[in-house]
Amino acid sequence: MVRRAILSVSDKAGLVPFARRLAARGVELLSTGGTQRALADAGLQVKPVGEFTQAPEILGGRVKTLHPRIHGGILYRRGLAADEADVKARDILPIDLVVVNLYPFREAVAAGKSFAECVEEIDIGGPSMVRAAAKNAAHVAVLVDPADYDRVAGEIEQSGVVGEPTRFYLMRKAFAHTAAYDAAIAEYLSSRGAPTDKPRHFPDVLGVVYEKAQDLRYGENPHQAGAFYRATREPAEPTIAYAEVLQGKELSYNNLLDLEAALACVKEFDETACAVIKHNTPCGVAKGDTPAEAFARARACDPVSAFGGIVALNRPVDAEAAKELTDLFLECVVAPSYTPEGRALLAAKKNLRLLESPRLAEPRESWKRRPEEARELRSVVGGLLVMDRDLGRIRRDECQLMTRRAPTEQEWRDLLFAWKVVKHVKSNAIVFAQGDRTTAIGGGQTSRVESVKTAVMKAALEVRGSSVASDAFFPFKDGVEEIIRAGATAIIQPGGSVRDPEVVAAADAAGLAMVSTGMRHFRH
Ligand SMILES: NC(=O)c1ncn([C@@H]2O[C@H](COP(=O)(O)O)[C@@H](O)[C@H]2O)c1NC=O
C-alpha cells in the first residue's frame, strides 16, 4: 500500500494533477521547498520535509532530504525483522513513492553559465533519493519522468499499490536517468583542466548514454544481431532516431543507415528537394517545383538503382507525389508530413515503411545543436572514433577561380548544387549535375578516375553540359580528362594537389571553368 510519497522536483510539469490524484487516495504528501509551495498553492495538504525530519533545510538547500528519516523510510526492507526493528526504534515511517527529477545541470551548461553556477546545479539529494528508491524497488516506486505519472496514479487508484512490473520498469529508468546525469557532469568537468579554463573541444571522458529504441531483426547481415539506441533527449534538428513510423514492415539496421543518409542529404536544401539512397549513398538528388517533380527528377538519374531505394523529401507528400512514389518499389520514405490523400495512396503499399519527421519543415535556424549532436561516433574494436559532423557548407564567394574561364551563372548554380550532393556520396565521390538535379553519380571507388568513369558509364541522363563536383582534389589530370571527354564544362573541387598546375592546364586547354573550395568532403 502506498501510504506516503515524497515529491521533490525541478521540472514541475504535471506535478499538481498527479499529486491531487495521490491525495485523493489518502497518500500523505511530503515535499521540499519549491515543490511544497507549488503544491500548497494548488490547495493540497503537504508536509514540508523539514517538519517531517525535524531538521530544517540548511546550506541554502544543499541539505534538505539527506536525513535518516527520509533515506531510512525509503530504503528499509519491508518485512525484514532487523530492518523493521531499526525503523521502529528510530521512529522512521515508510516512504513508498519517490517522485524526483534533478536540478537542471545540463541546461545550465547549455546556457553557458559560469563554472560555479553549473557546480551549484549538481543535484546531490535528488540522485541519492532516486538511487535509494530504485535500489529498494522491491518495495518502493520511483518516478523520474512526468510521462510516467499517469501510469503510476492509475495503478494506485486501482489497487492502492504500484505493481511489480511497473516498479522494476521505474527502477531501470531511474538508474539510466542518474547515469546520464552523472555522465554529463563527468564530461563537463573533464572538458577543462581548471574551472577557469576554456572548455576543450573533446572532453577527456565521453559521457555516452543512449537508450534502446528497439531490438532489430538483425544487424547488417542476418547472422549479426542488431539493436538501435537513441539519445535520451530529442534533438532540435530532423533525425531518424525520433521520426515516427506511420506504416510498413519493421525497420532494419540497413534501413536506418540509409534513412539517415537520405535525411542528411535533403537537409542540405531549403528548396523542395528529394534524395534517393541506395546502400548509404545517393543515386539521385533533385530539386523540383513540387515534391512529385523532385522525386521524378531524382529517380531519373539512375532508375535502375532507385529500385528498392530509400527516399527523403523535405516537403509534405501530397497525392501527386504519392502516385509517383507508388509507381516504384521502394523500401522507405521519409518526409515532414503527408496529406490525407497522399497517406491513403501510400497505404496501399503495405510493406513500404513510411516515416514522418516534422522538424524537416522547420527552418534550419531552429535546428539548434547540443554539443553532442554535432559529433559523429564510429567504433573500432576497443575504441571510439569521434569527430565533428561534416556540417561544412560553402558559399560562392568563398570559392577561388583556378582556370582562365570563370563559370557562367548556370554553371555556378549547377556547381553549388553538385557540391551539396557530393558531400553525401561515398568517397571517391564524383557528381555530375545540371538544372538542379544530378545527372550522374560515381562513388565508392578506390581511385578518383574510376569514380568519374563509373558515373559516366552508369549515366541515364545526358551528362554533356553538366557541371561536376569532386569530393577531394584530383591527384592526377586523368580524372579531369575523363570529365572533359564526357562533355562536362565546369568543375568544383577542394584544390590543393601538388599536381594542380597540370590539372588546371588540362581544364584550360579544354575551355573548362574550375573553382576550388578549400574544403574536402571525404565520406568513408
Ligand atoms: N539537498 C537535498 O537534500 C536535496 N533534496 C532534493 N533535492 C533536489 O531539489 C529539487 C527540488 O527542490 P524544490 O522542491 O525546492 O524546488 C529537486 O530537483 C531535488 O532533486 C536536493 N537538492 C540538491 O542536492
Image (tube, grey):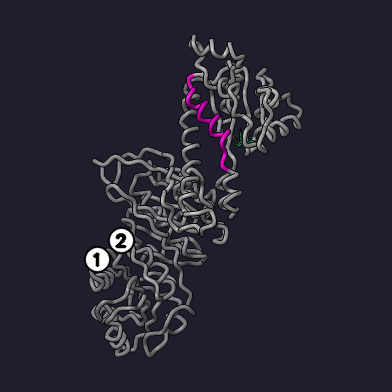
* Magenta run includes residue 306: no
Query: Can you say which quadrant of the picture contains the N terminus?
Result: top right
Q: Is residue 197 left or right of residue 505?
A: right
Q: Earlier in the sequence, mark 2 or mark 1?
A: 1
Q: CA distance from mark 2 to mark 1?
A: 11 Å
Name the spot of residue 72 as percent of width and height, x first. 56, 20
Residue plotted at (27% across, 63% down) = 444
Which numbered circle lies on residue 445?
1
Relative vertical location of residue 190 with respect to residue 90 in this rendering, above or below: below
Q: Is residue 459 left or right of residue 48?
A: left
Q: Nearer the viewer, residue 57 or 372?
A: 57
Relative vertical location of residue 490 with respect to residue 250 in this rendering, above or below: below
Q: Quadrant of ligand 1?
A: top right
Name the spot of residue 368 as percent of width and height, x first. 54, 57
Which numbered circle lies on residue 524?
2
Q: Nearer the viewer, residue 308 or 373?
A: 373
Q: Amino acid at mark 1?
A: Gln
Q: Which residues are magenta?
A: 122-138
Q: Main secondary structure of the magenta part?
A: helix
Query: Can you say which quadrant of the picture contains the C terminus?
Result: bottom left
Q: Is residue 462 left or right of residue 109?
A: left
Let me know if residue 246 appears in the view.
Answer: no
